[in-house]
């Protein structure tokens, strides 16, 4: 009986020019993928079928995906092979072969234009919001109107002319929401470009785990000491408001 081709496990290979090596970092966290290189070409293999058609792959410049059949490489839906399978390549897991680099330091507080190499991008997964940043001037009339049982579940601190609220459920206030990942506060709808970067950033910038790292979409962050947070109450808000000139 002839073998049912639908039951065959497809093996995918890919290539892109050596000049595009830096772009491969976008898929560094795909631990099933292996990478090798010759003089002019980066080679990749081990993709799942889902990875082979993903948006992360399609955005890589000059990237060509192949299906390996009996030692020959076929482009998608092609009936004629494009080339033979490469041999004598030295393969390594992509997450080990591509090293992550960090800037020497990050004093990049909100409003300062210096940039770091860490990038955020829109994420595909939804996460519950646990933090909210609001402008003090916009919420000065909202907090006194909130019932005490809602306030007592929230911690807060002040960042310049803004308030950072932390806790769930969040208050219904105007502002920007954030979700938490390994001690980071990331803007709702965004994640690190390299998903396995979050723990490495904590090791680099928050070794004592005594801070929250509050991120903006442009890849800059603000470290906030956990000890600076206090329980939210109408009295603490009014007292803080009186010491500032937001009005």
Image: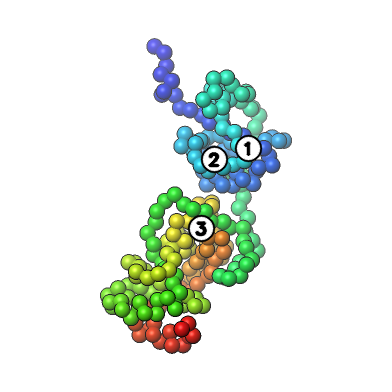
Tag on residue 196? Answer: none
Q: Which is in the foreground here, disc 1 or disc 3?
A: 1
The residue pinned by badge 2 equals 57
Residue 215, relative to residue 237: is it above or below? above
Residue 110, relative to residue 83: is it above or below? below
Q: Are marks 2 and 1 in contact (CB under 8 Å)?
A: no
Quarter of the view holding residue 175:
bottom left
Callout 1: 10 Å neighbours few (<14), some, many (20+)? few
Can residue 36 be spotted in the picture? no
Mark 1 or mark 3: whose residue is earlier in sequence: 1
- The residue at 43%/84% (across/down) is 241
Residue 88, relative to residue 187: is it above or below? above
Q: Position of residue 128 (x, y in %)?
A: 37, 59
The residue pinned by badge 3 equals 199
Quick check: 149 left or right of 126? left
Mark 2 or mark 1: whose residue is earlier in sequence: 2
């Amino acid at each position: 009986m002839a073998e049912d081709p639908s039951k065959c496990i497809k093996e995918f290979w890919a290539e892109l020019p050596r000049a595009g090596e830096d772009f491969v970092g976008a898929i560094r966290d795909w631990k099933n993928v292996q990478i090798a290189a010759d003089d002019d070409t980066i080679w990749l293999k081990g993709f799942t079928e889902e990875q082979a058609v993903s948006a992360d792959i399609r955005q890589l410049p000059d990237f060509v995906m192949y299906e390996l059949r009996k030692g020959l490489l076929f482009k998608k839906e092609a009936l004629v092979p494009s080339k033979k399978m490469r041999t004598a390549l030295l393969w390594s897991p992509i997450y080990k072969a591509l090293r992550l680099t960090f800037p020497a330091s990050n004093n990049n507080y909100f409003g300062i234009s210096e940039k770091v190499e860490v990038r955020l991008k829109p994420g595909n997964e939804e996460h519950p919001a646990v933090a909210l940043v609001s402008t003090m001037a916009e919420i000065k009339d909202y907090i006194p109107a909130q019932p005490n049982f809602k306030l007592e579940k929230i911690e807060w601190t002040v960042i310049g002319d803004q308030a950072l609220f932390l806790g769930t459920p969040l208050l219904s206030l105007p502002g920007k929401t954030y979700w938490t990942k390994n001690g980071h506060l990331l803007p709702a709808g965004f994640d690190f470009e390299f998903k396995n970067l979050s723990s490495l950033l904590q090791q680099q910038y928050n070794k004592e785990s005594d801070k929250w790292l509050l991120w903006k979409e442009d890849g800059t962050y603000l470290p906030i000491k956990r000890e600076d947070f206090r329980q939210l109450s109408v009295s603490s808000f009014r007292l803080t408001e009186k010491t500032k000139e937001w009005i």
